[in-house]
Amino acid sequence: MFGYCIWLEVPTLWNYVINYAIKYQGEFFYPHMSIETKIKTKDEALAKFNKVSFFRKFLTLGKPYITSESNFHAIQCNIIEYPGKHISIAYRYDKKWTQEELEVCKPPKRVKAGKIAVWYCNNKVIEWYKV
């Protein structure tokens, strides 16, 4: 689906993301901001990872919104400090998120970021792993 990805991990969102997934039957995944996605090879991803520059330790989240691509549905928040970047709050296959589910999605406004890492993000979310 997304190939190799370079992520800024956001471990401070872990409890929120997992609790939201349990309550609304979403997927379990490690919270992150995608720096780059759809990298074709592991070697290319690692080379790009070694060139990644500094990212802020604290991120401000915008208002949650819904996106869908094929059969993959997400609730995301834009990151104020990085226009064009987002953090996903919830993923689900086969069932779109409803307006009601979106309205109760209230993640923290400010989160602490963690490490930058390379992940392999093909197939179902449950099969994604850190390289």
Image (spheres, grey):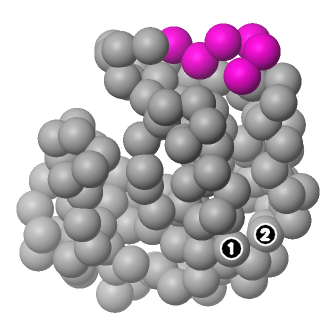
- Above or below 55: residue 68: above
Query: Residue 56, can we see it?
Result: no
| Disc 2: which residue | 111
Q: Is residue 96 in sight in this rendering?
A: yes
Q: Which of label 2 and label 1 is nearer to you?
A: 1
Above or below 35: residue 100:
above
- Quadrant housing residue 67: top right
What range is drawn magenta here?
A: 96-101
Indicate the position of residue 107 as horizontal and vertical percent values: 80, 50
- First in sequence, mark 2 or 1: give its number: 1
Task: Say the numbered circle drawn on residue 42.
Answer: none
Q: Residue at x 18, y 46 (%)?
A: 122
The amino acid marked with disc number 2 is: Val
Kindly identify the amino acid type of the residue bearing the numbered disc 1: Thr
What is the total number of numbered labels drawn onto the structure image? 2
Q: Residue furthest front?
A: 23
- In the image, 48 versus 101, the foreground residue is 101
Does the residue at mark 2 contact the one at mark 1 (Cβ under 8 Å)? Answer: yes
Residue 100 belongs to magenta span = yes
- Residue 92: x percent and y percent? 44, 29
Distance from the alpha carbon under mark 2 to that under mark 1: 6 Å
Residue 82's spot in the image, x, y percent? 73, 57
Q: Is residue 45 above or below residue 127?
A: below
Q: Position of residue 57 (x, y in %)?
A: 74, 83
Label 1 sits on a secondary structure element that is: helix
Residue found 39% across the figure and 78% down from its top: 117
User: Magenta includes 76?
Assistant: no
From the image, tell me which residue sits under label 1.
12
Q: Does 39 sit left or right of 108 as displayed?
A: left
What residue is rendered at 47% in x and 24% in y? 73
